[in-house]
Image (cartoon, rainbow, N blue to C red):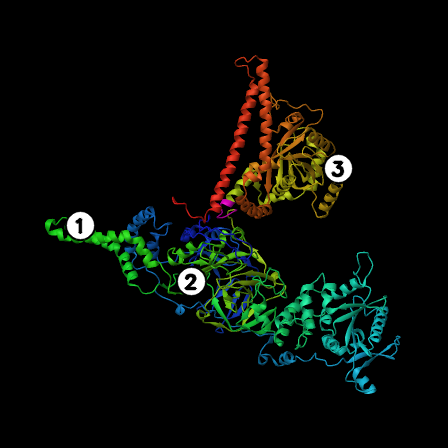
């Protein structure tokens, strides 16, 4: 439908950033809703319960016979088939989900997995009749509008008398609180935060946080003759045994040797010998008695797994650390030689080396290179390690961590965990456990839970977070909204550009469950009502003025009826009935007064702010303006509803003339409008547009999601904003999944129900979809195990673009298709893209075109090929460009499926392909065939910038040569200048005749005048007898149609900001210059003709007269286009630049 809402003047900005600007407040007008007229829709079915009319899902889940077990908050157990469901806020039963949607979506294709119904007008009929008097009015002070309102008041007064029983809702629910969430999680967790809830074996595992602590290494490599500077070998000994034999040494110092198995393989003896040689040399140079190296000092197989996670303690107790590098796999410099710096960067790209750099003692690290000068190792300062070694990875983030461990800055516990996890996941590792990154992070923290080999990466990190005081990292994390749909869980960046420490959680993570889920406790829940609006209770407070106005308006029709009755009784009675007539006149005047004052009385009764309102959270699919929503719920448009200024990433706001930030309808933003229109055709898994209606705050929030969220969880705050993750129930029916977003202020005292043990999925590797809900909340929806969420399509016959007939953008797109003769092919004719090699061989052997020079009559060009050729021609500017077309032959028709440009150099008058273009052609075709594209080259195209579509002499020779050696072949010419000027593609297709064929020469004009540039007029027509034109049409497949829609979004918006005087400037200048040259030539021709005929009357040439007449028409055409450009510029200036300007007055 066409949008006729409020138009503000503002700079829309991009993304979630708030634009600046001013807005002129204008009244929005409600959109007419079809309501119960939807019963005529072919897919509408009915039932006895609300909603009575609805549509069944267009897609159904596989395995419909499979039953899932569900246990509700009251302990009732039921078996349900898989479908979209919600928990009813009154009884806690799991029911099928019904979602209200706009008329366009309801009449469109059935593309949802939930039941759909339509948006209803639920306000009392009496209220709607009263507000009908004033709802249309744009200017209440206008006498014209007052006249219309007075004319409407009479039938409205009579109608309100007849429906006196149907007044506004006087019953409220739940003491005006929001609808609760009746839910409790009955399952078990893999690990509970409360140790008493864990079973005995798991409780011991969960409590054992000191198992990986180590005060001294258990083994060391002790030097033989430690005071000898020459290498004499080492002995690997147990430290306890060494103490027993040598005597205890409380100051036992040792060297930590770091290396990578990428450089020194444990299975290669030469690598181990070289590694120990480096280690011994470094140890003697440091004048230490021993060194620790993992390949020799983790000797106990039973403790090997635990020793890996004790390396951080070994490193903390070392005197210093050195790095050994050697023969890398990829470490080469630009000269091709292996360098120490390159080997060090390769070493630093491994995950387990990262904590070694952070924890190693000292402020510098020595690097020894295999086969290098071991007496002069490379010395790298730790504070320069990030810039020298991690330059191409995460130097900025890693530098913060190094500075933290050097003591120059202090990171909080949250910052340390988040930054370290990000760095660990950006490095390479050979996976031993799924949670290796979390276990590497464990070395940086104080408490270390026991390793569980069954943990996923997220479970391992969650257990680590629960074991340590991490400032509620998990609770903060589940309240963030990821930037991208496929953002991994360990990337904790937030759409709202907030850090975790900006969020204050109100819930707690009670446990860690399977499938990468956490169990939260202490959250407050709100249920969202999706199926229909209902007439909510509202009150504007006690007022005698409002009471009297309501009585007068309600009984005004009765006053009129009493007056007419008294007249009817008193008139026949004669003088005795005069008293009745006088009383009747009084009642009539009372009626007339109330009648005239009806518009004002309606505003008194139903206007003003509410003092009490039923708090309810409604939702529907699609977009409606605020006036339509208020009219549907409250009966009229009084401007109470406003759009949330920052409730979701789709929200938009401006600063008005008073310096106040106010929300505006997001649909006015071109990018959001594009999303709304595209969502009308969304399939399962695609993002859809939903709108939340908050009747307490009287705010609207548009958001984006894959499925409608049925529950909002009050989990955290950020400043004055609440973060409410929203919920969609999983296929298992006993858990929920989602993630969160941010919102505007919400009164938690209106949320009464606390949800106990809600299971929350943040599954890594799952498909996550983000949405923002409510003025106060936003959300992320996550589909776990997407491969099991297969859908079966139910096909219905529907219009191609349901509901888009009235939209100016889609009308323009339709005209574009008609102007260029672009036809949509049905699915069967998508076979035009299927290449039949046997059929092509048959027609190539028959060669029917050799028998009939005019054999080919048509060419069908795909929409994609047309766009590519047109854009290529346009990119050349005044220079000619050239390319080739791919396709095949179908009867007497060329089918062009694709086109590609050639790397050629052109001029303003010609373009020629050289050897480089031929090589490019061969390579391109080989690559196409390798990808399964078997179409041959069936023609070539080039451009004629500004001088029409025809073949010059060179073009004719080129086409004739191609037809001689690789027929069938086609020549296509595109004029990019005339394409831009006319608004449709200026294109022509031609084939040349054989050299021995004589064509009809009647096509040439008698006077040689042509509608082409004068410089080309001589050549145009000189070769017209050597070729003929082929009828051009275009086609598009279903995929092409979708792509064109996406491209059209950007084009349609750009045309609003473009002026034809600027976009066609070059072409217009060339037209006027060429026209002046033609006028000069025509003037000279007339002068010569008159001189030769002695100025005789009527001596002019008919051909000259026709030329002058054609010049006059061309002049008028050019002038009309320039005038149209000027008018368009002025109209756009008034529409887009002067909306905020005040009307001028005489004093101005």
Viewed as shown, does residue 1038 lie left or right of 553? right
Q: Secondary structure at mark 1?
A: helix
Q: Residue 424 placed where, x, y %?
A: 69, 67
Inter-mark Cα distance, 2 to 3: 71 Å
Is the residue under label 1 in contact with that under label 2 (CB below 8 Å)? no
Per the rendered image, the range of residues in magenta is: 800-809
Inspect the magenta stretch and tell me whether residue 804 lies in it: yes
Residue at mark 3? 914
Q: Is residue 1126 above or below residue 286?
A: above
Residue 439 shows in this picture: no
Give the residue at x 72% y 44%: 924
Q: Residue 117 placed where, x, y %?
A: 46, 56
Is the residue under label 3 in contact with that under label 1 (CB below 8 Å)? no
Q: Earlier in the sequence, mark 2 or mark 1?
A: 1
Residue at mark 1? 568
Q: Secondary structure at mark 3?
A: loop
Q: Residue 317 placed where, x, y %?
A: 74, 78
Residue at mark 2? 695
Q: Is residue 971 above or below residue 4?
A: above
Q: Which of these two is toward me, 1112 or 382? A: 382
């Amino acid at each position: 439908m066409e949008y006729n809402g409020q138009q503000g003047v503002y700079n829309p900005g991009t993304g979630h950033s708030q634009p600046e600007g001013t807005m002129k407040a204008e009244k929005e007008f409600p959109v007419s809703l079809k309501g119960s007229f939807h019963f005529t829709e072919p897919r509408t079915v009915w039932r006895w319960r609300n909603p009575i009319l609805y549509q069944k899902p267009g897609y159904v889940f596989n395995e419909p016979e499979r039953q899932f077990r569900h246990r509700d908050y009251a302990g009732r157990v039921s078996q349900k088939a898989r479908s979209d469901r919600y928990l009813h806020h009154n009884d806690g039963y799991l029911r099928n989900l019904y979602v209200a949607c706009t008329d366009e979506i309801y009449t469109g294709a059935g593309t949802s997995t939930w039941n759909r119904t339509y948006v209803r007008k639920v306000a009392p009929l009496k209220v709607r009749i009263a507000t009908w008097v004033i709802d249309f009015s744009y200017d209440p002070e206008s006498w014209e509008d007052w006249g219309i309102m007075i004319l409407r008041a009479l039938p409205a007064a009579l109608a309100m008398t007849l429906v006196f029983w149907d007044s506004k809702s006087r019953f409220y629910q739940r003491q005006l609180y929001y609808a609760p969430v009746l839910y409790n999680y009955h399952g078990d967790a893999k690990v509970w935060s409360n140790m008493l809830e864990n079973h005995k074996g798991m409780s011991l595992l969960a409590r054992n946080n000191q198992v990986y602590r180590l005060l001294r290494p258990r083994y060391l490599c002790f030097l033989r003759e430690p005071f000898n500077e020459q290498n004499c070998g080492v002995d690997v000994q147990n430290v306890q045994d060494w103490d027993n034999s040598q005597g205890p040494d409380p100051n036992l110092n040792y060297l930590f040797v770091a290396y990578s198995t990428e450089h020194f393989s444990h299975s290669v003896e030469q690598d181990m010998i070289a590694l120990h040689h480096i280690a011994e040399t470094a140890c003697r140079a440091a004048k230490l008695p021993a060194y620790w190296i993992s390949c020799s000092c983790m000797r106990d197989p039973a403790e090997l797994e635990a020793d890996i996670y004790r390396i951080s303690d070994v490193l903390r107790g070392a005197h210093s650390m050195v790095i050994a590098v050697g023969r890398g796999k990829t470490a080469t410099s630009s000269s091709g030689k292996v360098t120490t710096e390159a080997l060090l960067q390769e070493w630093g790209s491994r995950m387990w080396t990262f904590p070694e750099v952070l924890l190693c003692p000292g402020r510098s690290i020595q690097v020894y290179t295999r086969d290098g000068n071991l007496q002069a190792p490379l010395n790298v300062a730790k504070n320069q390690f990030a810039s020298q070694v991690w330059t191409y990875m995460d130097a900025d983030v890693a530098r913060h961590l190094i500075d933290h461990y050097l003591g120059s800055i202090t990171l909080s516990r949250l910052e340390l965990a988040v930054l370290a996890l990000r760095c660990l996941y950006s490095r390479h590792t050979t996976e031993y456990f799924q949670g290796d990154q979390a276990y590497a992070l464990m070395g940086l923290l104080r408490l270390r839970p026991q390793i569980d080999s069954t943990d996923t990466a997220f479970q391992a990190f969650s257990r680590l977070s629960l074991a340590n005081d991490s400032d509620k990292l998990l609770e903060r994390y589940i309240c963030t909204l990821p930037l991208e749909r496929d953002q991994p869980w360990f990337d904790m960046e937030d759409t709202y550009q907030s850090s975790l420490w900006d969020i204050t959680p109100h819930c707690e993570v009670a446990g860690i469950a399977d499938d990468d889920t956490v169990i939260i406790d202490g959250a407050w829940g709100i249920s969202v009502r999706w199926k229909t609006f209902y007439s909510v209770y509202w009150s504007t407070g006690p007022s005698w003025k409002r009471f009297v106005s309501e009585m007068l308006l309600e009984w005004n029709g009765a006053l009129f009826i009493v007056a007419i009755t008294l007249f009817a009784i008193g008139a026949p009675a004669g003088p005795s009935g005069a008293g009745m007539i006088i009383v009747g006149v009084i009642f009539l005047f009372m009626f007339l007064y109330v009648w005239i004052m009806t518009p004002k009385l309606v505003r008194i009764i139903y206007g003003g702010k509410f003092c009490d309102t039923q708090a309810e959270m409604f939702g529907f699919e699609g977009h409606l303006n605020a006036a339509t929503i208020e009219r549907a719920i409250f009966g009229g448009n009084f401007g109470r509803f406003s759009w949330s200024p920052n409730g979701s990433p789709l929200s938009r706001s401006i600063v008005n003339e008073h310096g106040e930030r106010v929300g505006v309808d997001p649909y006015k933003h071109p990018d959001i409008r594009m999303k709304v229109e595209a969502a009308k055709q969304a399939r399962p898994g695609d993002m859809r547009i939903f709108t939340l209606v908050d009747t307490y705050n009287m705010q609207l929030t548009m958001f984006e999601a894959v499925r409608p969220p049925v529950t909002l969880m009050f989990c955290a705050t950020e400043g004055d904003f609440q973060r409410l993750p929203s919920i969609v129930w999983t296929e298992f029916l006993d858990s929920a999944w989602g993630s969160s977003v941010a919102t505007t202020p919400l009164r938690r005292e209106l949320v009464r129900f606390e949800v106990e043990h809600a299971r929350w999925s943040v599954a890594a590797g799952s498909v996550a979809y983000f949405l923002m809900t409510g003025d106060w909340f936003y959300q992320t929806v996550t589909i776990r195990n997407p491969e099991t969420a297969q859908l079966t399509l139910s096909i219905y016959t529907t219009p191609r673009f349901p509901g888009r007939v009235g939209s100016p953008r889609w009308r323009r797109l339709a005209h574009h298709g008609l102007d260029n003769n672009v036809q949509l092919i049905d699915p069967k004719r998508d076979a035009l893209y299927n290449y039949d090699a046997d059929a092509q061989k048959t027609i190539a052997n028959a060669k029917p075109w050799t028998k009939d020079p005019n054999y080919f009559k048509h060419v069908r060009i795909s929409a994609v090929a047309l766009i590519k050729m047109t854009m290529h021609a346009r990119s050349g500017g005044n220079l000619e460009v050239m390319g080739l077309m791919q396709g095949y032959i179908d009867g007497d028709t060329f089918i062009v499926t694709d086109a590609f440009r050639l790397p050629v150099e052109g001029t303003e008058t010609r373009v020629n392909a050289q050897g480089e273009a031929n090589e490019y052609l061969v390579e391109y075709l080989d690559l196409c065939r390798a990808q399964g594209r078997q179409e041959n080259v069936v023609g070539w195209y080039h451009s004629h910038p500004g001088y029409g579509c025809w073949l010059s002499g060179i073009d004719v020779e080129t086409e004739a040569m191609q037809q001689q050696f690789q027929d069938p072949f086609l020549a296509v010419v595109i004029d990019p200048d005339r394409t831009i000027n006319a608004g449709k593609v200026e294109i022509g297709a031609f084939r040349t005749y054989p050299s021995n064929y004589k064509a009809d020469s009647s096509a040439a004009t008698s006077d040689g005048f042509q509608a082409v540039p004068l410089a080309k007029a001589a050549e145009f027509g000189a070769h017209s007898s050597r070729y003929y034109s082929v009828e051009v049409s275009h086609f598009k497949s279903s995929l092409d149609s979708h792509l064109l829609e996406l491209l059209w979004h950007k084009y349609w918006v750009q045309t609003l900001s473009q002026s034809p005087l600027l976009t066609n400037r070059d072409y217009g200048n060339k037209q006027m210059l060429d026209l002046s040259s033609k006028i000069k030539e025509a003037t000279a021709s007339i002068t010569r003709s008159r001189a030769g005929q002695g100025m005789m009357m009527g001596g002019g040439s008919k051909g000259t007269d026709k030329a002058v007449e054609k010049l006059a028409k061309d002049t008028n055409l050019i002038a009309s286009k320039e005038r149209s450009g000027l008018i368009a510029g002025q109209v756009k200036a008034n529409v887009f630049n002067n909306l905020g300007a005040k009307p001028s007055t005489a004093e101005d």
